[in-house]
Image: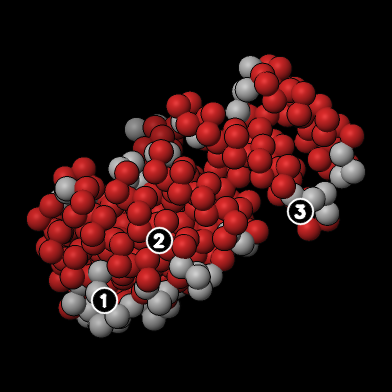
């Protein structure tokens, strides 16, 4: 064999080792660029990457980059090495990289990740990795994680389970609506919404409505938004009740208003118009902004309400933002009869309203 042939045979290994060795040198940016080249080397780099990963004395960043690169290899020996390193690494960020690599490998790594659930310290990251794989084989393992005493673990597992939209998981979702942790209750609402195509609408309304009175605003927000996704007349009633409550905070008013505008039904629109006088300024602004997406059949009623609200608001500084949005929404209604009224606003005392009136007229004339 000639010296040229010998070089040709040894070159891939030499190049691979030289490239992988660069993961152990240079600054973070250099290593990042080098890791992208390592990914293109394939099997030639596997042995050296495993050696770096398994060397606990090796530089932290080198092991981190090696773990990332190993996510490209769906091999039993790679999974075993990643899991072993995951279980023994003293650093949380390093375990994150190993969990991400196992997630990238996917279904082949499910069983190995499931074994880590037995270790309380490793369970949160193992659940996160399983949640990202989204494969039916993860369901039994994620169910086990629902018994964990830590709410972030339960919430992560529940969000992952809910993504399957499997009606057989409904009892877990329903039970979690009463979880002591707000994050888990919010995840349960998202799960319930994901199953809405397979559940009676009235059952969803009856289940979600009480959660509008939850002590945690994140849960109230999720419940309101879930009801907002139900384009059914009966789904407006609990949201309108929330608006009518005399002590309803302005944030909850905003949640209810946004949800009702998403419903885009006649009961929702009628109830919103009647509630105008009770709404706090942020909720009024949310309502005006939501009117832009009103269904064509409801535009005459919406147009009349918007024009009436605009006329009733004096041109004061505290009304400026709301009046400007009212003008824009009127322009989006596409009603030619509004042109005269919009032109009159070109001489409004508020320069901002004048500019918005010009924009609304241009929009009206382009429709």
Tell me residue 284's x, y (percent): 61, 53
Dot 3: what SS? helix
Question: Nearer the N terminus, badge 2 or badge 3?
Answer: 2
> Which dot marks residue 311?
none
- Is residue 302 in view from this perspective? yes
Which residue is located at x 59 percent, y 33 percent?
303
Whether pointer 2 and pointer 3 mark residues with C-beta atoms closer than 8 Å, the reply is no
- Is residue 224 in view from this perspective? no
| Residue at mark 3 | 319
Whole-angstrom CA distance, mark 1 to mark 2, is 25 Å
Question: Label 1 crowding class (10 Å Cα cut-off): few <14, some 14-19, many 20+?
Answer: some
Dot 1: what SS? loop
Tell me residue 278's x, y (percent): 57, 60
Question: Nearer the N terminus, badge 1 or badge 2?
Answer: 1
| Residue at mark 1 | 179
Whether pointer 1 and pointer 2 mark residues with C-beta atoms closer than 8 Å, the reply is no
């Amino acid at each position: 064999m000639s010296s040229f042939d010998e070089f040709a045979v040894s070159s891939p290994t030499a190049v691979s080792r030289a490239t992988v060795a660069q993961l152990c040198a240079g600054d973070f940016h250099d290593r990042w660029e080098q890791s992208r080249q390592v990914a293109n080397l394939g099997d030639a780099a596997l042995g050296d990457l495993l050696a770096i990963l398994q060397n606990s004395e090796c530089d932290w960043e080198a092991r981190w980059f090696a773990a990332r690169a190993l996510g490209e290899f769906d091999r039993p020996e790679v999974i075993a090495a990643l899991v072993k390193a995951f279980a023994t690494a003293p650093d949380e960020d390093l375990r994150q990289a190993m969990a991400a690599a196992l997630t990238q490998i996917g279904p082949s790594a499910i069983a190995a990740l499931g074994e880590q659930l037995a270790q309380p310290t490793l369970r949160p990251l193992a659940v996160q990795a399983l949640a990202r794989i989204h494969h039916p084989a993860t369901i039994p393992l994620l169910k086990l994680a629902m018994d964990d005493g830590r709410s972030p673990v339960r919430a992560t597992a529940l969000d992952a389970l809910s993504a399957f939209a499997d009606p057989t998981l409904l009892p877990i979702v329903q039970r979690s609506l009463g979880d002591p942790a707000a994050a888990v209750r919010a995840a349960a609402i998202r799960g319930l919404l994901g199953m809405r195509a397979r559940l009676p609408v009235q059952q969803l309304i009856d289940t979600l409505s009480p959660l509008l009175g939850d002590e945690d605003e994140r849960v109230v927000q999720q419940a309101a938004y879930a009801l907002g996704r139900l384009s059914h007349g009966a789904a407006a009633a609990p949201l309108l009740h929330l608006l009518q409550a005399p002590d309803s905070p302005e944030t909850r008013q905003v949640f209810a208003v946004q949800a009702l505008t998403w419903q885009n039904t006649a009961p929702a629109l009628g109830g919103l118009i009647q509630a105008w006088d009770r709404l706090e300024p942020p909720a009024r602004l949310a309502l005006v902004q939501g009117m832009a997406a009103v269904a064509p059949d409801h535009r005459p009623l919406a147009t009349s309400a918007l024009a009436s609200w605009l006329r009733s608001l004096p041109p004061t500084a505290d009304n400026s933002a709301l009046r400007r949005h009212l003008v824009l929404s009127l322009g989006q209604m596409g009603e030619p009869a509004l042109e005269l009224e919009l032109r009159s606003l070109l001489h409004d005392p508020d320069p901002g309203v004048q500019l918005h009136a010009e924009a609304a007229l241009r929009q009206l004339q382009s429709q």
